[in-house]
Image (spheres, rainbow, N blue to C red):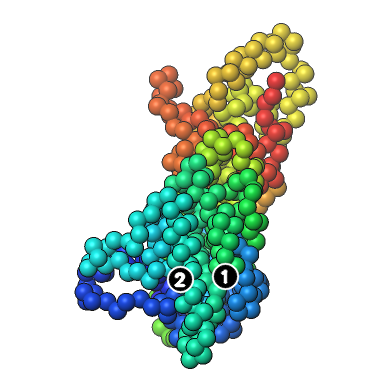
Amino acid sequence: MGKEETPQIPRRTTRSSSSSNPILESTKPKTLKPLTLKDLVFEESQNSITLDNIFSAFPCRKNQILELIRFLGPLNSPLLPLVVYGGPCTGKTSILLQIFRHLKRPFIYSSCRTCYSPRVLFESILNQLLLHRRFSVNGYSSVKRCEKPLDFVNFVKEAFVGVLDKLKENSEKLMSNEVINGRMMYLIIDNLELVREWDKSSQILHFLFKLYDILNMPEVGLIFISSTSPDTYCLNAGYFEHVPVVFPDYTEDELLQIFFKSQENSKIYSSFLGVVQRPFSRITKRLNELSTAFSPLYKKYCEPLTEVGVVPNEDIKRRLFSHIQPHLGPSLNEIFRVSCQPCLEGEMNAEKTRLKKSTWKLEAHQNDIDCHMSISAKYLLVSAFLASRNPATLDASLFDSTGGSDNRKRKRKNSVTSMEKKETAEQEQLMKGPGTFPLERLLAIFQCITSVAEIDLDEEQVDNNSLIGQTGDGGLMSDVLLQLSSLCNANFISKGPSCPLEGSIRYRSTVSEELALKVARSLKFPLSKYLYRR
Ligand SMILES: Nc1ncnc2c1ncn2[C@@H]1O[C@H](COP(=O)(O)OP(=O)(O)OP(=O)(O)O)[C@@H](O)[C@H]1O
């Protein structure tokens, strides 16, 4: 890992992950040591880690670390089920596992990313609890075959009883307390949001949320980790309330602190961050994506430097900037492509689910919408929605040179009959569903609404243009076109065949009014004022 990268704390290799990889297994000796209670604590717990180590390894997360420690409570205290939630790469998993390493408490960890079905999840939990290793000798089989929640409950209760007895015995032997602390056992289930993808009827989610009541074992602590808020699960209650622990997204300042930490030449790194931080964090605030983008760029940035530890003056900074400048555009495009895709898909999935499950709460999308879709992509989505819903004939009156939406006054000027005709045509168009539009119309609306926007889109463009190399409108347009293509890929805008008369491609917005209003609200853009209603 280069100095400039986000410090990585090695993740604990769980028994489920290490034992399910046949390639790794085949390279291991055939006779593996049987697993013992010690395998239930963080593998590196032998090397103690203090709370201060965790604070300094994870800047800007002191509150969350302390909150988690407080909820976990003193040794052997029961734990109300927790839901640790926050956007991707906000440190939920790493921090929780490091806390367990610090506390040396026994736990099992299964991620719904690697455990991709109820069966795999249940079996992974049972394998760990029953200290069972899947490897070549046992044909990589699990300790139990378990598909149904009911079977799982019976097996898991029995397994927990067995482990808890052993922990009790262990805690009575003072010697072994050095490695394993306490008589509580914790079950951590990570990436809970992914269960929704393989559990369309939410049965498993219901079951998992009820597990605390079903088990009714105060010595078992349950912790769920999710990248969406508990509200998004919207299961009708009926189970013990889970305690939320929020990991908010990092702000730009916090990202700076995290990146800045432990740099050899902080002066150079600081001037590098001054160049890249703002434009990149507009596209994504994910630490891993930024870290991946910054790492090669920083190497490039430092190339012209001949001395180590040089303090850069304005002249050096200018030289370094012009050296790195040609690489910024491609890197920004790359990070946009990488970060936008899952994000837009996430929104699309959330939207699809909403349509299927009308009982889901509105807040279900909140986190998804607030994800790091760039401001201009959001404006583009809103522009496409307007182009699809409003008759083209009204564009001129809705969007004057000031981007104004003072359409009522103008409409009154029309004669009553022509208004009636227009309204009938428009009603017909509404009946047909969202209309199609050419690219020019989309861009015209985009330009109008962004010209009156409250936000500093201009600033964003200026920044980007200056970075992409003073490409002026060309740079901006290529950015918008890139975003349009991402919105099309994510099916927020559908691309039709080219119109036989015009010869150009026509587009159509596919988002619901509710979603469009939500996006508009996040931009503080008064969408309803621009929306034609009869
Ligand atoms: N405050 C921080 N300081 C340093 N590194 C951090 C910080 N927060 C997160 N990281 C690093 O970011 C990476 C991702 O963290 P982690 O997997 O814990 O996030 P997560 O919130 O669990 O993500 P996901 O929801 O995608 O599973 C890790 O390498 C972690 O060390």
Marks 1/2 in contact by CB < 8 Å: the verdict is no
Q: Residue at x 32, y 69 (%)?
A: 133
Q: Is 106 left or right of 395, judged from the image as shown?
A: left
Q: Residue at x 32, y 64 (%)?
A: 20
Q: Is residue 482 above or below residue 67?
A: above
Residue type for callout 1: Glu
Q: Quadrant of residue 260?
A: bottom right
Q: Position of residue 333 (x, y in %)?
A: 44, 54
Q: Please indicate, yes or no, whether residue 64 appears anywhere in the rendered image.
A: no
Q: Quadrant of residue 209?
A: bottom right
Q: Residue at x 44, y 66 (%)?
A: 159
* Closer-to-camera residue (100/6): 100
Q: Position of residue 189 (x, y in %)?
A: 49, 61
- View extreme (bottom): residue: 175
Residue annotated with mark 1: 219
Quarter of the image where the N terminus is located = bottom left
Residue 508: mark = none
Secondary structure at badge 1 equals loop
Q: Position of residue 322 (x, y in %)?
A: 46, 67
* Closer-to-camera residue (143/402): 143
Q: Is residue 362 above or below residue 193?
A: above
Asked whether mark 1 lies closer than 8 Å to ligand 1, one says no
**How far apart in space, not on screen, are marks 1 and 2 (Cα)?**
12 Å
Residue type for callout 2: Gly
Q: Residue at x 34, y 63 (%)?
A: 143
* Closer-to-camera residue (231/120): 120
N-terminal-most mark, 1 or 2: 2
Residue annotated with mark 2: 162
